[in-house]
Amino acid sequence: MNDPAAQQHRTEIMNRLKRAEGQLRGIQRMIDDDQPTLEVASQLLAVRKALDSAHVHLTVGVVRQSLHRSLSNMAPAGDNATEGQAVVGHDLSALVDGVVGDVHSLLAKMR
């Protein structure tokens, strides 16, 4: 994975999952220590939100990859690309970012 944006995206998802994992361990300790059920339920809600957030980020990543893959297959790249195609490619990248942002917002509202 040489793409810095993809690596950053992967790191963000992993951090969210690690946070949820730590929260789950904390909940297990709370149950072992007979903490009040309402406090345990509150922590479970926090874990659920963390997992929902990881799911949204993962879904957005899938959409971004799919769009970039589709767009890169549409036009020649490298030595065969003209200056105009490079500008169009840049515009398409901006379009992908806009669509991905819209998908992210929509998924966040669905949580």
Image (cartoon, helix red, strand yellow):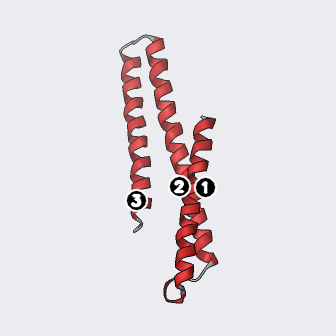
Q: Which residue is mark 1?
A: 99
Q: Estimate how packed mark 3 is, as few (under 14), some (14 to 19) or many (20 or more) residues with alpha carbons within 10 Å.
A: few
Q: CA distance from mark 2 to mark 1?
A: 12 Å
Asked where in the image residue 16 lies, by quadrant, the reply is: top left
Q: Element under label 3? A: helix
* Foreground label between 2 and 1: 1
Residue position for label 3:
7
Q: Is the Cβ of the residue at disc 2 closer than 8 Å to that at disc 3?
A: no
Q: CA distance from mark 2 to mark 3?
A: 11 Å
Residue type, label 1: Val
For label 2, the SS is: helix
Mark 1 or 3: in front is 1
**Dividing the image into 4 quarters, which one contains the N terminus?**
bottom left
- Horizontal and vertical percent position of residue 10: 43, 54
Residue at mark 1 to residue at mark 3: CA–CA distance: 20 Å
x, y (%) of residue 30? 38, 19
Labels 1 and 3 touching (C-beta < 8 A): no
Disc marking residue 61: 2
